[in-house]
Image (cartoon, grey):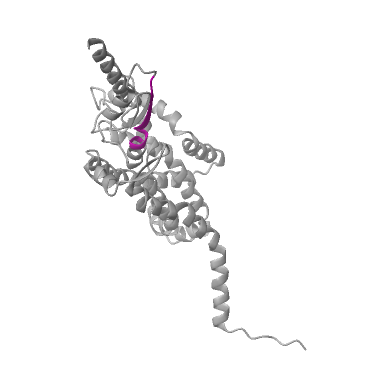
Amino acid sequence: MKAFTKISAKDRHRKENFQGYLFITPLFLFFVIFTALPVIITLFYLGFTKYNIMNSPQWVGLENFKRLLQDSAIPQIAWNVIRLPLFLVPAHVCCSLLLAYGVYRIGNKYLKYICRTAIYFPAIATTASVSIAWGYLFNKDLGVFNWALKELGIITEGIPWLTSSKYAMISIVIFSIWKFSGLHFLYYLIGFENIPVTYYEAARIDGAGEWTLFRKIVLPLLTPSIFYVLLTTMIGTMQAFDEPYFLTHGGPGDNTRTVAMFIYEHESQMFKVSLRSNGIVDVSQIASYFGGGGHVRAAGCDLAGSMYDVINNITAEIEKQLTEEENA
């Protein structure tokens, strides 16, 4: 007769824990390799070096942090990081929740399908393409928003939505609600569909009205969905790039510039310039003027600024050298 081995509760608990750790190991490794390590490398290595894809890293100590703190745009960007979530997070959470509840209460399934598609469609459209259309909608002279407000008698002159420090952030918030609320709307709608109908029926029998149903049944059961939307919206606003980049280009000034835009623009404004000459121009002299070096026929340097600024500065020095040689 086969004997059975008795397994203690402690051993069974240890075995279950091992299985759980085994299942989460791939996700943990993915997180370490693609999230944790890049952050650690950036903070503790690249943060103390001067590095781009053209050159090998050069140790600069705290120079990068010094330049960051001395940048005049940082205070405004820091304020943008604070105020953008203050506007966007409540707007996304509330608007998408109300839209989902309204569509959920529609009795006609065909009308519900049309509304659901129309609300979700902006979420799948590319930001670059629709932002062009919204740029025209926000136009001060010919935009639909200003035309509608004038027709309603609310304003007499067009509002500079995208070029005013007072309205630029509001424009981004309006566009973001239209563009991304559809995704959050879908999360809420799935949550509504999963609430048993019997809960509503029992509450109505007890005399509960619509507001009581929403407050006592809907909100408590949608707490996981609300928390998820709140968290993802917060993360999204911290990483905002497309909306301010395509609508306002971070302006006016730095009023809508985000951290992601600052990093992108800062890195994209660095150019490695390689200079070659047939002997007429001493390119080493030009390179040394901009902090680089080399010899008469081949030299190089790093320049900050737009591509047009770099070209203009280099050609100006070439022209200056040629003029001096002609006058000599």
160 or 33: nearer the eye?
Answer: 33
Position of 177 compared to 109: left or right?
left
Q: Is residue 250 in view from this perspective?
A: yes
As displayed, is residue 21 above or below residue 101?
below
As displayed, is residue 111 above or below residue 145?
below
Where residue 279 sits, quadrant-wise, is top left
Quick one: which residue is furthest to the top in this view? 326
- Which residue is located at x 35 percent, y 52 percent? 43
Q: Is residue 235 magenta?
A: no
Position of 274 compared to 104: left or right?
left
| Quadrant, the N terminus | bottom right
| Quadrant, the C terminus | top left
Horizontal and vertical percent position of residue 191:
49, 53
Where residue 141 sits, quadrant-wise, is top left
- Which residue is located at x 37 percent, y 34 percent? 268
Q: Is residue 139 in view from this perspective?
A: no
Horizontal and vertical percent position of residue 14:
55, 77
Q: Which residues are magenta?
A: 265-277
Horizontal and vertical percent position of residue 232:
41, 49
Quick one: which residue is furthest to the right in this view? 1
As displayed, is residue 270 above or below residue 214?
above
Q: Is residue 270 magenta?
A: yes
Position of 14 compared to 168: left or right?
right
32 or 96: nearer the eye?
Answer: 32
269 or 198: nearer the eye?
Answer: 269
Where residue 256 sits, quadrant-wise, is top left
**Number of numbered discs:** 0
Horizontal and vertical percent position of residue 4:
69, 86
219 or 45: nearer the eye?
Answer: 45
